[in-house]
Amino acid sequence: MASTFRAVRGNRNSQLFFAGLLLSTIGTWVQFTAIAIVVDRLTGKATAIGILTALQFAPMLFFGAWGGAVSDRLDRRKMAIATQSMLAVQAATIAVLDFAGALSVGAIYVLTLALGLINALDNPARRGFVTELVPEHQIASAVSLNTAVMTGARIFGPALAAILIDQVGLATQWLFTANALSFAAIIGSLVLLDPSRLHPPPRVARGGTPVRDGLRYVRRTPILWATFIVFTVVSTFGFNYNVVLPRIANEVWNDEAWFGWTLTAISVGSLLGSLATASRDRVSLRWMAGMGAILGVAQLGLAWAPSGFVAIGVGPIMGLGAAGFVAAMNSITQQECPPDMRGRILALTAVAFLGSYPIGGPLTGLVADTVGLPWSLAYGAVISLVAVGGLVWWALGRHPDDSRFEVLRTLLGSSTAVAPSTSERP
């Protein structure tokens, strides 16, 4: 536990930032759960939630890398304050429309697209700023704790939304209002930080080709290239359970409240997976592959869960694998890139993860509506397992003259064992 939280021990800046981020992200998940329920009530189609997901994350696919280049050039703290303020306005607009009875599916789609555009700038700035909170040797811990906070908030957000909607009978507009107010926590924490105790990287000069430079670096660094390919595949097909869970909760488990409770169960595991990754000084390919395998196998179990009770039993295992896989990818990329390129590499990671939703989300919704709800989860789980197996085989193949079992014990023991030599890097 001491190694897990070393990035915040005695660091007031980290403590302030992560506390504010936790409160704000809880509000975000309250809104996400409420929006999904509203869209499901209005349409009754998983495809509609898939379109919602596509609109939210399409801007990250097209503009995320550019947002990372901008964050490498500007003051990330000031940039995050600006983007978080815009996100607060977006949430307040949804609340006002809901209070006025004008929150239609079309209005939700437009505001969700606006959310995606803002996030294309906010995501690399906010995540890149995490690396400025701590010295170099604590970056892996800080990045994994950031994932832990983001996923841990899902324990409280969906559960709180489910309780307030199902048990208390609170109208959704009050949940949207709560989310708008929650942004005060993250904005306030950013304002109260001590700038003199930050560790800013060198600013990238204007001009040049920063996005292409980042892409070239990934392409010429074998461990990054291999992990990015696998991460993109798993992100596209293995993380779309939010699209179909509202339908499964209604049609299979016979109560829409199971959607929130299942997300909460998944998030319990997500917190554990993120914290377990944060406890490691360096994150290995073995760890990343293991987490991906857990995600795929557990998602197969969730696909055919006969009841909500079974789903919340499988959920923590799936969350453990999902968050551990994402946190491992984030940590490996930060271990393998120079400080002045972290914003761009983090942005490319976000493009691979969030930018894949416009493809995977609608496809998953289409499979749910045409083939069947269980298969909408199962097909992604199978593809994810094949991709993870490919990563392991690639790592083993880096030393074809060695015994496969010996390589498995030594080569995957640490990420540096498969990292390229200095001559292989640009």
Image (spheres, rainbow, N blue to C red):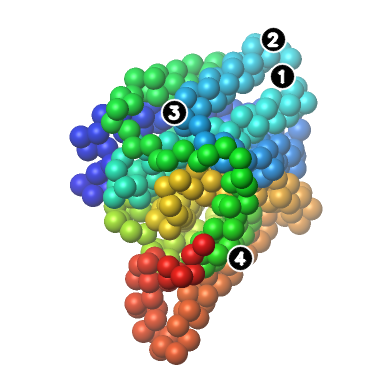
Could you give the CA–CA distance between mark 3 and mark 4, rounded to whole angstroms? 40 Å
Disc 4 + disc 2, Cβ < 8 Å? no
- Lateral position of residue 235 relative to residue 74, left or right: right
Q: Which residue is mark 2?
A: 100
Q: Amino acid at mark 2?
A: Ala
Q: Which residue is mark 3?
A: 77
Residue 305 in view, yes or no:
no
Q: Is residue 134 above or below residue 166?
A: below
Could you give the CA–CA distance between mark 3 and mark 1, rounded to whole angstroms? 33 Å
Could you give the CA–CA distance between mark 1 and mark 4, rounded to whole angstroms? 38 Å
Mark nearer the N terminus (3 vs 4): 3
Could you give the CA–CA distance between mark 3 and mark 2, rounded to whole angstroms? 35 Å
Q: Amino acid at mark 4?
A: Val
Q: Residue at x 78, y 26 (%)?
A: 106
Mark nearer the N terminus (3 vs 1): 3
Q: Amino acid at mark 1?
A: Leu
Percent x, y for residue 420? 45, 69
Write down the quadrant of residue 387 in the picture. bottom right
Q: Residues within 10 Å of mark 3 (few under 14, many from 20)?
A: many
Q: Residue at x 37, y 67 (%)?
A: 416
Q: Amino acid at mark 3?
A: Arg
Mark nearer the N terminus (4 vs 2): 2
Mark nearer the N terminus (1 vs 4): 1
- Number of labels in the image equals 4
* SS of the residue under disc 2: loop
Q: Residue at x 36, y 29 (%)?
A: 17
